[in-house]
Image (cartoon, rainbow, N blue to C red):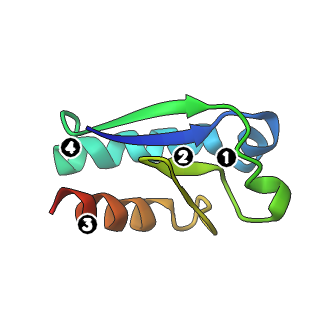
Amino acid sequence: MITIEICIGSACYVKGSNQAVTILQTLLKDKQWEEKVEIKGSFCMQSCQGGHGLGIKINGHQLLGVGLHNIQEVVEKEVTELLS
């Protein structure tokens, strides 16, 4: 099982982490990955404090530079690589 963690801290929430969850839920459904990938909330990853975008980890690996503008593409690429 692949785990995607999304920061639900106040700064990431303001930057759209709640919208990120919706985008990723739709991606999982569209790709039929619901049995292979889970989405979890996480507390502060300090990603936004360093100006690295939303706090997002896949299997413990923190992604940098991810925002609402590219989250679908970045996560799709990472998960596809992990599933192959």
Q: Report which residue position mark 4 lands on.
A: 33
In the rendered image of this protein, does residue 57 appear above or below residue 6?
below
Helix, strand, or loop for circle 1?
A: loop
* Amino acid marked by disc 3: Glu
Q: Earlier in the sequence, mark 1 or mark 3?
A: 1
Helix, strand, or loop for circle 3?
A: helix
Image quadrant in which the C terminus is located = bottom left
* Amino acid marked by disc 1: Gly
Neighbour tally class for label 3: few under 14, some 14-19, many 20 plus, Cα within 10 Å: few
- Distance from disc 2 to disc 4, alpha carbons, whole Å, reads 16 Å
Q: Report which residue position mark 1 lands on.
A: 16
Q: Earlier in the sequence, mark 3 or mark 2?
A: 2
- Distance from disc 1 to disc 4, alpha carbons, whole Å, reads 23 Å
- For residue 34, which numbered disc appears in the image? none
Q: Position of residue 35 (x, y in %)?
A: 18, 33
Q: Report which residue position mark 3 lands on.
A: 81
Neighbour tally class for label 1: few under 14, some 14-19, many 20 plus, Cα within 10 Å: some
- For residue 20, which numbered disc appears in the image? 2
